[in-house]
Amino acid sequence: MENYCKLILLISLGLSPLAVGAGLDLCLKISNDRDRLKCYDKLHGFDQSSEANIGRLENRTLERPSPIKLGSSKAQGNKDADGATISAAQKAYDTIIANSQTLKISNISKSRSGKVYYYTQSGRVFRKNTDRTVTFKRNDSVTLELGFLGSMFMTNQDDIRIKVKEMKVRK
């Protein structure tokens, strides 16, 4: 029984290309391109309604956007901006400006656990976040540089660079 099923399968697989190829041979003999395409479409059962649109060009006109009006006020730009968005943007702008300014170290303290804290004249506090033995001195002028993945570096006038973390001051 098993061999009988395999034999039928082999015969059907052997004869199926002959049945499909017979129709293709008729289409290959047609020399006109349009007629040959129609023959292929009939063999594969495609719709003939798209045949009328072959070779026709369709012209479409696109509307241009309205020109930019000069002299319009910029306050109309985003009427939907709420107070929280504006305050968050202002806060981000203030931190960027604060980080770009040169800071002066007013005090240096060391905790019991050995952590070093740098206090600036502007009231900001930074903790040394590295095990390097280099340190800053009092009255050093430092600049803040942003590093990869939110890290911060302080660089003084002698190009000594230390990784720091800004501490939140409790009031």
Image (cartoon, helix red, strand yellow):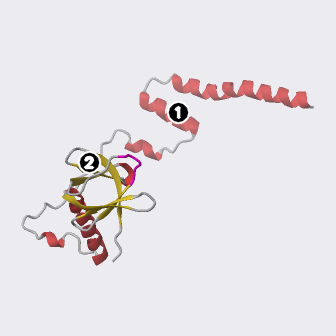
Residue 115 is marked as none
In what quadrant of the picture does the N terminus appear?
Answer: top right
Task: Residue under label 1, please give it.
Answer: 40
- Does 144 lie within the magenta span? no
Quadrant of the rendered image containing residue 118:
bottom left
Measured from the top left, where is residue 99 in percent x and y? 24, 59
Task: Residue under label 2, please give it.
Answer: 59
- Measuring 51% from the left and 22% from the top, which residue is drawn there? 29
Question: Furthest residue to the front?
Answer: 112
**Amino acid type at image mark 1:** Tyr
Which residues lie in the magenta part?
129-133
Circle 1: element type:
helix
* Of pointers 1 and 2, the one earlier in the residue sequence: 1
Quadrant of the rendered image containing residue 16:
top right
| 58 lies above or below 67 | above
Side of 49 where 99 appears, left or right: left
- Measuring 43% from the left and 26% from the top, which residue is drawn there? 32
Name the foreground residue: 45 vs 70.
Answer: 70
Q: Main secondary structure of the magenta part?
A: loop
Measured from the top left, where is residue 72 in percent x and y? 10, 69
C-alpha span from label 1 to label 2: 29 Å
Q: Specify few, some or many for label 1: CA neighbours under 10 Å numbering under 14, 14-19, or 20 or more.
A: some
Question: Furthest residue to the right?
Answer: 1
Measured from the top left, where is residue 130 in percent x and y? 40, 50
Name the foreground residue: 61 vs 54.
Answer: 61
**Amino acid type at image mark 2:** Asn
Measured from the top left, where is residue 100 in percent x and y? 21, 56
- Measuring 17% from the left and 72% from the top, which residue is drawn there? 76
Circle 2: element type:
loop
Name the foreground residue: 59 vs 136.
Answer: 136
Q: Are marks 1 and 2 in contact (CB under 8 Å)?
A: no
- Measuring 48% from the left and 29% from the top, which residue is drawn there? 36
